[in-house]
């Protein structure tokens, strides 16, 4: 039997660079597509809805907009492909491993597609633009799945101990939040390029620069890490949807996913609306978005070490429930906020705590469940466990996109406050559901079987 190299924190940090890359691309699309493709400009924020004239804006079914439906269908398509790609990855036996070959192939097309979303749907024909946007989003989500699903499976495989599972979850949470924070710099970078390339050109060049940085970050771990040196992985023999059914038959996993779906529904409502909350409710210029996000990120990162230490002492469940309730408070503050930059900082400060907790610990919970299943069955289906989680929460995200674009179609302050109120109510419900998750039993069984 081949002697495996020890997994070190240095290796886990290099692995975490990939999370920075894909979260930056995801952040550009999630945080700015709705902002640039819908809404109306004003004196403070002239780029709001700058690409809106190129696609259909009027509601096409009740209050459902075409753009909202396209985003939702993209997320549903993304969710459906998750178990297929996970099954492919779990069953693969490539020379370079089960996961890294996917990451090496997909990093560049994933990045190029992100750029295309802000460039290609800009012909003089609205129908052609609608069609191009739909196709590009489907391709974007497919490429993201083909990179992220194998990547996420490595969280469990590199997390060979409870210590490593919490550490790797901490590191990738840090790089995820940094990637998301960098994505909020898009208006600032675009503004710096505006003098040379114009308003629209500045946005597109800024997206291209961010996509290039993201691509490099994704390629570094894909080529630096030699998967076979650290992981003794054997291909799974279970077919994708059989594996998916087995995964959801796990009672503890179902309890975890139920709260996770609701959390991501609430969080997606909030993230999609964040630029609007700041510009339309708080009357803040969109160039301040990065400052507020950077503040929130800095405070959150300062809390990573305490969260890591406390989780090992009191368990992940108590902290996750605390994070749920804390986010509920953030959403309620947003619902009731007034005007002025001070409100942006209040949200940034209060959101830092749940961001640190829920950015780190849920992945570790999935890794625990996956590890227990591996010990019980002898079959490593870690790819499917993470894919099943993303399958579920992406359905929640899809519904959130439909709800947000429908609720806010009028563009009034009341409509944006309503979306934040919905996020508050649903996140509170998610916190209550998570009380049924039995973390202690899972960890005791792992310890016993080892």
Image (tube, rainbow, N blue to C red):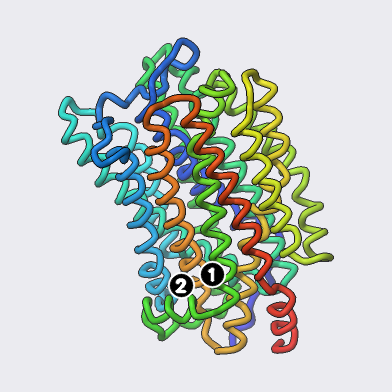
Is 82 in front, or is 270? 270
- The percent position of residue 385, horizontal first and vertical second, equals 51, 71
Q: Is residue 166 visible?
A: yes
Q: Badge 1 local density, few (<14 within 10 Å), some, or many (20+)?
A: many
**Which residue is found at the position 63% from the left and 22% from the top?**
338
**Which residue is found at the position 37% from the left and 57% from the top?**
78
**Which residue is found at the position 57% from the left and 73% from the top?**
253
Left or right: 26 as drawn, with respect to 181: left
Task: Mark 1 vs mark 2: give the one in front.
Answer: 2
Tell which circle, 1 or 2, labels the residue nearer the N-terminal end.
2
Kindly identify which residue carries mark 2. Answer: 98
Asked if labels 2 and 1 touch by Cβ distance under 8 angstroms, the answer is: yes
Marks 1 and 2, how far apart at CA: 8 Å
Q: Badge 2 local density, few (<14 within 10 Å), some, or many (20+)?
A: many
Is 107 in front, or is 224? 107
Q: Secondary structure at mark 1?
A: helix
* Vertical placement of residue 164 versus 324, above or below: below
- The percent position of residue 144, horizontal first and vertical second, equals 41, 53
**Which residue is found at the position 51% from the left and 22% from the top?**
280
- The percent position of residue 399, horizontal first and vertical second, equals 41, 51
Q: Secondary structure at mark 2?
A: loop
Left or right: 37 as drawn, with respect to 375: left
Kindly identify which residue carries mark 1. Answer: 227
Left or right: 134 as drawn, with respect to 283: left
Dividing the picture into quadrants, the one containing residue 340 is top right
């Amino acid at each position: 039997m081949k002697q495996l190299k020890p997994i070190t924190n240095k290796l886990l940090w290099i692995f975490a660079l990939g999370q920075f890359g894909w979260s930056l691309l995801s952040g550009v699309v999630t945080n700015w597509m709705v902002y640039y493709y819908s809404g109306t400009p004003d004196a403070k924020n002239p780029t709001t809805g700058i690409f809106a004239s190129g696609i259909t804006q009027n509601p096409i079914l009740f209050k459902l907009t075409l753009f909202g439906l396209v985003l939702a269908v993209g997320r549903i398509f993304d969710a459906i492909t998750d178990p297929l790609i996970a099954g492919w990855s779990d069953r693969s036996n490539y020379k370079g491993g089960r996961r890294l070959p996917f990451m090496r192939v997909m990093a560049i097309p994933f990045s190029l597609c992100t750029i295309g979303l802000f460039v290609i749907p800009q012909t003089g024909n609205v129908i052609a633009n609608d069609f191009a946007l739909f196709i590009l989003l489907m391709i974007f989500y497919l490429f993201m799945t083909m990179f992220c699903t194998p990547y996420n499976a490595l969280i469990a495989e590199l997390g060979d101990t409870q210590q490593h599972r919490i550490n790797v979850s901490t590191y990738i949470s840090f790089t995820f939040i940094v990637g998301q924070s960098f994505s909020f710099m898009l208006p600032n970078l675009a503004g710096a390029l505006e003098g040379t390339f114009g308003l629209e050109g500045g946005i597109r060049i800024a997206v291209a620069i961010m996509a290039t940085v993201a691509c490099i970050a994704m390629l570094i771990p894909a080529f630096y890490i030699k998967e076979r040196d650290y992981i003794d992985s054997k291909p799974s023999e279970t077919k994708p949807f059989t594996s998916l059914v087995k995964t959801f038959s796990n009672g503890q996993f179902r309890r975890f996913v139920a709260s996770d779906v609701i959390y991501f529904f609430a969080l997606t409502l909030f993230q999609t609306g964040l630029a609007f909350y700041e510009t339309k409710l708080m009357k803040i210029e969109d160039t301040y978005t990065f400052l507020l996000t950077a503040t929130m990120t800095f405070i959150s990162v300062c809390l990573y070490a305490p969260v890591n230490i406390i989780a090992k002492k009191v368990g992940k469940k108590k902290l996750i429930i605390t994070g749920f309730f804390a986010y509920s408070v953030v959403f309620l503050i947003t619902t009731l906020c007034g005007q002025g930059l001070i409100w942006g900082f209040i949200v940034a400060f209060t959101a830092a705590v749940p961001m640190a907790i829920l950015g780190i610990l849920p992945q570790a919970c999935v890794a625990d469940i996956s590890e227990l299943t591996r010990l019980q069955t002898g079959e490593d289906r870690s790819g499917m466990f993470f894919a099943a989680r993303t399958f579920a929460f992406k359905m929640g995200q899809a519904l959130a996109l439909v709800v947000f674009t429908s609720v806010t179609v009028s563009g009034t302050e009341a409509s944006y406050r309503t979306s934040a109120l919905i996020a508050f109510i649903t996140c509170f419900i998610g916190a209550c559901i998570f009380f049924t998750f039995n973390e202690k039993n899972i960890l005791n069984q792992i310890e016993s079987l080892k």
